[in-house]
Amino acid sequence: MTGAPPSPEPVPISASVPASVRAWLPASAPGPAAVEVVEYTDPLCPWAWGSEPVFRALRAALAGRVRWRRAYAILFDHDDDPPPDPAAERAWYARYVEEISSHTRAPRAVRLSRMPADSWPASLVAKAAEPQGPEVAERVLRRLRESVFVLGEPADTTELALAAVRGVPDLDPRRLAVDAASGAVLEQVRADRLEARRPVADVLSARGGSPHPGAAKETAEGGHRYALPTLLVRTAGEYRVVPGWRPYEAYAAAVEEVGPGPAVAPAPLTPADALERYRSLTDPERALLTEGHWPPPGAVRVDTANGPLWLHPDEAATHPAAP
């Protein structure tokens, strides 16, 4: 999907948030195109979890050539009404996740303890991790996703979100807790939520062969928000938007049309190198990102209801899902 920059864009995203928040935003990408990739997501979204193999490959292909920014859309809002029958809601949501994982092949928990109640705590913790560096932020977000889809215990309170990321290498947990409770991070996630509820017109309907084509979702306020995940690729002059669950080629084509040249999929890593880099790999990820005999020495297998999760031994030492 294509078009001129969405109105009132294209202003730099930092200009749309308070000055106290701007210091939290990553620097713009180098080069004349100044391409920004905005990933509308939620740590507790099953379609976003299922998109991780392709997004990991795309981020690797574009490393150093674009500015990749995550906007947390808040799938489960704390103002939502509580379910009248939590057990029935849990059972329905477990079936929903099972259906999605049948398409994405992403792991799902053997037993989901409850339907996630609130996306704010995990989103605040994920956003608060960003100033500690991209590798730390990636691993924090990954742990938050795994809380629901591997452990079956959604990180939907501040205490659970902070516990889920305990032991992430190079993470300063005290700083993370302070920053996640700060007004600056709260304002930034509020800005993310608002931004996600101003979708470009292209996504008000969406077609395609995907089981999740990604048409914008109606909100309780009577508007729309981006379906999760959605990628918006933009420069100062134009944009492309790719909603829903799509193959690598769809995202790569959008980047190439406005961006810094071909988004050629990265060469496969050896299994050992991939596990060293990513620390945690699903079977779809290892199939897409690696080449060679699997598993590598020392890999720790965590069984789920839809295939294993593989952990680096150092990651397994602190991961709450490790046997």
Image (cartoon, grey):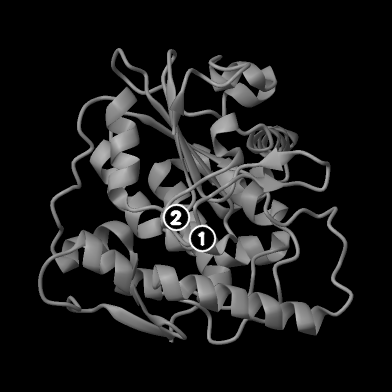
**Quick one: 85 or 66, which is closer to the camera?**
85
- The image quadrant of residue 307 is bottom left
SS state under label 2: loop
Residue located beneath label 1 in the image? 47
Q: Seen in the image, is 39 located left or right of residue 181?
A: left
Residue 142 in percent (x, y) is at 47, 59
Q: Is residue 318 visible?
A: no
In the displayed structure, does residue 294 sit left or right of residue 112?
left
Q: Position of residue 27 (x, y in %)?
A: 44, 24
Query: How far, Cα to Cα, is label 2 from label 1?
Result: 7 Å
Element marked by disc 1: helix
User: Where 98 falls versus 81 (above or below)?
Assistant: below
Residue 65 vs residue 319, the one in the foreground: 65
Check contact, mark 2 vs mark 1: CB within 8 A.
Answer: yes
Q: Could you tell me which residue is drawn at 83 percent across and 57 percent down?
A: 80
Q: To which residue does mark 2 refer?
A: 245
Q: Is residue 245 rendered to the left or right of residue 113?
A: left
Looking at the picture, which amino acid does disc 1 mark?
Answer: Trp
Question: Residue at position x 61%, y 66% from top?
Answer: 163
Q: Is residue 223 visible?
A: yes
